[in-house]
Amino acid sequence: MDIALLGLLLNMTIVLSLIVRVLTRPHRDPSSRIAWIAVIGALPIFGVIAYFLLGETNIGHRRTARMKAVIRNMPPSKVVSPNSNQNTLFQVPKRFQLLFRLGRSINGFEVTEGNSAQLMTDSNSTIASMVKDIDDASDHVHLLFYIWLPDNNGIAIVEALKRAASRGVNCRVMADDIGSRTMIHSKHWKEMKKTGIHLSRALSVRVPILRSLIVRVDLRNHRKILIIDGKITYCGSQNCADPEFRVKAKYAPWVDVMFRFEGPVVRQNQYLFASDWMSHTKENINSLLSIPMDTPSTGFPAQVLGTGPTVRYSAMPEMFGSLFHAAREELVITTPYYVPNESMQSALCSAAWRGIKTTLILPAKNDSWMVGAASRSYYKDLLQAGVEIFEYEGGLLHTKSVTIDREVTLIGSANMDRRSFELNYENNILFYNPELTEDMRSRQQEYLSKSKQVTLERVDAWSLGTRLWNNTLATLGPVL
């Protein structure tokens, strides 16, 4: 048989086999299937290689099995509250209760009562507060960051951890192997190990090229968690770095939000950290999850939402969509990356169509040109529905927040894009508290004061080339 013909038949066999796999792969929405079939069919060689590298959310069978075994063997996550004989949602208005029930379905975490929290002023004050809490720690410090840079703020945390370890505090530290690679390969990482700090590289990629042939190396741990003595935790969008973010300085300052929480919700963040820690190390820290907790008789309801490739598929977009549908008066959203799935886009448009004052705040200049362009492809439909879109011009708006009717807030690490939906491990906290939500609304209002509104006239004036570019990248969203 002619070699060229044999090669053609082999290529067609591979392409057809991959198309069958795309069509039969579970947990994939129709737009993703269509996009991959188009790429594989139109670009047989490139498409096949791209699918092997990016086509499936696979972190490795052994790693997945270990993570599931760790979670299966963890003690029950229920925290007993002083109102345990009553409905645990008694403080939450009925129209918001379904949000917390949906949250419970993700990790099994019940809504907790008796929580308190403080919205941090800015990135530098957040690090200063973290350093103080680490300096005050008496038993343990648990830290997990996606990006940890060896800059002023990053080193301040390093030094605080070293001081804590030197006085006998048990410090367990994780950093994403790709996001924090500059810290991991710096002298500071080695110094922490010498001081007695327990270190772990989340989703380690020691030989990237070889690893990419087996699993997707771009599946990352995007969480930002700090826990002090099981009593204090931080949650929000901020990485462990200066706001100048020197690795991408031209987009600076990075504008973030972090909350400092106390109360039973800390235990749920501890569960997330423990599941990550025990999945990557041989140390069992389940005993920390069984220590009795004092639950204050006053405080607001809150719940941790931990999502990722090994958690229920589509959990995060389901939560976002449910938040949009729950609004009755006002819905305000900030996110650096907006590449929704169809149901989320419809839910956001629906909120505006039914008369909800709906505001979406995005960065004017995005550090990801592909995501920035894809985001703008959704503008026209949103504007026609009545969504008010603003582009923040005071730096890179990195805050991920949703506020509903000035009563409910969702904050954390999850962006509104497919990477956060399907590829990254994320942590968020949902809470009902009008006073604290009002603080978050004030912060959102500060963003609006530094933003420029996007009008339908401006979008209609875009050139054919601009619209073609934006829509093409949006079409590739399910692939990327």
Image (cartoon, rainbow, N blue to C red):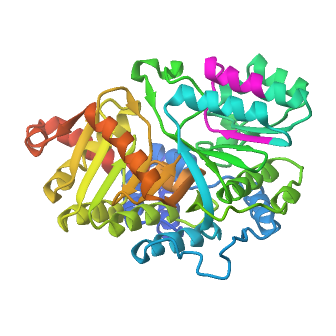
Would residue 416 be visible to someone looking at this image?
no
- Quadrant placement of the N terminus: bottom right
Q: How many marks?
A: 0
Inspect the magenta stretch and tell me whether residue 154 lies in it: yes
- Would you say 161 lies left or right of 246 here? right
- Would you say 407 lies left or right of 132 here? left
Compared to 409, does 213 lie above or below?
A: above
Compared to 415, does 25 lie above or below?
A: below
Q: Where is residue 375? Give x, y as percent.
A: 31, 44
Compared to 378, does 176 lie above or below?
A: above
In depth, the one of 1 and 387 nearer the eye is 387
Q: Where is residue 276? Give x, y as percent.
A: 74, 51
Q: Residue at x 86, y 43 (%)?
A: 139
In depth, the one of 399 and 218 nearer the eye is 399
In depth, the one of 377 and 62 nearer the eye is 377
- Would you say 226 lies left or right of 40 here? right
Q: Residue at x 77, y 53 (%)?
A: 274
Q: Where is residue 460? Give x, y as percent.
A: 9, 43
Q: Where is residue 106? Give x, y as percent.
A: 59, 68
Inspect the magenta stretch and tell me whether residue 336 lies in it: no
- Would you say 263 lies left or right of 379 here? right
Residue lying furthest front: 297
In depth, the one of 411 and 79 nearer the eye is 79
Would residue 432 be visible to someone looking at this image?
yes
Compared to 480, does 272 lie above or below?
A: below
**Over which residues does the magenta segment extend?**
141-160
Q: Quadrant of residue 208?
A: top right
Q: Residue at x 43, y 22 (%)?
A: 252
Q: Residue at x 51, y 71 (%)?
A: 91
